[in-house]
Amino acid sequence: MSRNSALILILCAASLSGCAADYLNHYDTVTLAAGDTQKYNSLLQTVDPLNPASRNTHIEGDGTRAALVAHNYKFPPPPPPPPAITVNVGGSGVTTP
């Protein structure tokens, strides 16, 4: 078998294996989403499923405070300095006889 015919054979096998992988993704079993049809149908027939508070377009807030929060997010303040650590070297100055 020549090199070209072997290459063509490998390419054909690779292209057919893609079809087999797509075929294997379709299962005839029960999925985890099964059993939600009643809930789905009731939500499908609901006139307005959104929360009534979602129509409120007046969001109370302060622009200056929002700008300060955005600035602190972009340029965070430096962390506080670590606490001072005292290291005692030597004796306590008391001698025992």
Image (cartoon, rainbow, N blue to C red):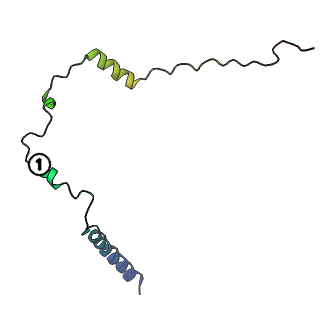
Nearest the eye: 1 or 53: 53
Residue 27: x %, y % from top left: 26, 68
Residue 68 to residue 27: above or below = above
Left or right: 62, with 8 as reference point? left
Q: Quadrant of residue 14?
A: bottom left
Task: Assign the C terminus to one quadrant of the image.
Answer: top right
Residue 94: x %, y % from top left: 85, 12
Residue 75 to residue 21: above or below = above
Residue 28 to residue 94: above or below = below
Residue 20: x %, y % from top left: 30, 73
Nearest the eye: 24 or 37: 37
Task: Assign the N terminus to one quadrant of the image.
Answer: bottom left
In percent of the image, x 8 and y 44: which residue is there? 46
Residue 19: x %, y % from top left: 27, 72
Numbered disc total: 1
The residue where tag 1 is placed is 42
In percent of the image, x 34 and y 18: which residue is there? 68
Dot 1 lies on which element? helix
In percent of the image, x 8 and y 39: which residue is there? 48
Nearest the eye: 35 or 91: 35
Left or right: 58, with 66 as reference point? left
In percent of the image, x 49 and y 21: which residue is there? 78
- How many residues crowd mark 1 within 10 Å: few (<14), some (14–19), many (20+)? few
Q: Quadrant of residue 32?
A: bottom left
Q: Amino acid at mark 1?
A: Ser
